[in-house]
Amino acid sequence: MLNIDLRIRQAAFKRLEAISQAPSGDVSWNAIAEPLPFDDGAIYLASRAIGIFKPKQMPDGILSIKTVVPKQGRTNIYADGTSDEGGFWYSLEAGGLTKSANRQLMISYERKDPIIYLIGVAPGRYFPLWPCIIDSVDTQQEICHVSMHDHTDVLRDVAEPTAAYRVDGLEKRHLIREVKTRVHQAEFRARVMQAYSSRCAMTGLPVPQLLEAAHIIPDSHQASTAEVSNGVLLTGLHHRAYDAGLVGIDPNYRIHVDDALLATKDGPLLESVKQLHGQQISLPRNAKQRPDREALDLRYQKFRGK
């Protein structure tokens, strides 16, 4: 029979698997904070007040660490503490080993416990990574390094094949690149969602589950940026149409529908797209977050030239 430490970690990982089903991968704090039934009581995955967390039922070590995006947001959405070593830097509590949380983190570091890293991508929203390993600690600088590779023999016993990020059989660099890409995508979407008040810029649809952050200058282009001003919030359908060159947005924020599409006659869904022709997109209240006109013009010229 598994000891209580492993049982808590397994239960926590299964909960994360259940609540992390959205394509974007990010999860609300309310979902994370929901008590998880365990034996005759309940455990929690994290604490709102502290970053380094140990459930009271866990004898020692930690279950999770958490970074937070304040309500005013960040100036640079890529400032997530990524490292050249293939992971993430995380700050300890100030005070070194005089702090109980840091001492418990050291226990998990020494044992190589699988833990959860909740990366804040927007106020009240997190991108959960699990299982993670603390693979180094610098008590003088009060930082530790967190990664999702190595020690697969330890992870295999706890993560099982249900964890969202599997480590077995994956080459180290590929795994870290995939993880960082997904974190950045989730952060970009969360910021764009916030800027557009969770409404499609073309249709006004207010259903977050159906909305995506479309890049104006594609992410693969060397001129692309991760700023909100390089994004537009669209439904999945309109995002695909925008990327396919069937719909364009000019520098004055007007919507243009491809001539061939305008001439096509079909059902009400296509008609709803055609009716957008000549309309203006809805814009964020914050002028700095509105689509960059130069980026729109570059993309619009491509739309016109096909």
Image (tube, grey):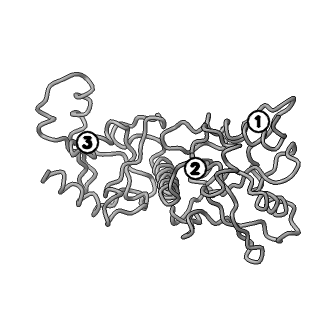
* Classed neighbour count for the residue bearing mark 1: other residues with Cα under 10 Å, few (<14), some (14–19), many (≥20): few
Mark 1 or 3, nearer chain start:
1
In the image, what residue occupies the spot 48% across and 35% down? 209
Which residue ends up furthest to the bottom in the rendered image?
140
Which residue ends up furthest to the top in the rendered image?
267
Element carrying mark 1? loop
Mark 2 or 3, nearer chain start:
2
Disc 2 to disc 3, C-alpha distance: 48 Å
Disc 1 to disc 3, C-alpha distance: 46 Å
Identify the disc placed on residue 279: 3
Residue 213, percent from left and from top: 41, 47
Element carrying mark 2? loop
The residue that disc 2 covers is 167
Q: Relative to 258, is 204 on the left or the right?
A: right
Q: Could you say which is closer to the camera, residue 133 or residue 92?
A: 133
The number of numbered badges drawn on the structure is: 3
Disc 1 to disc 2, C-alpha distance: 28 Å
Q: Label 2 sits on what residue type? A: Val
Q: Label 1 sits on what residue type? A: Pro
Q: For the residues labelled 2 and 3, say whether their Cβ atoms are less than 8 Å apart.
A: no
Q: Relative to 57, is 70 on the left or the right?
A: left
The residue that disc 1 covers is 35
Mark 1 or 2, nearer chain start:
1
Q: Nearer the viewer, mark 2 or mark 3?
A: 2
Element carrying mark 3? loop
In the image, what residue occupies the spot 81% across and 32% down? 38
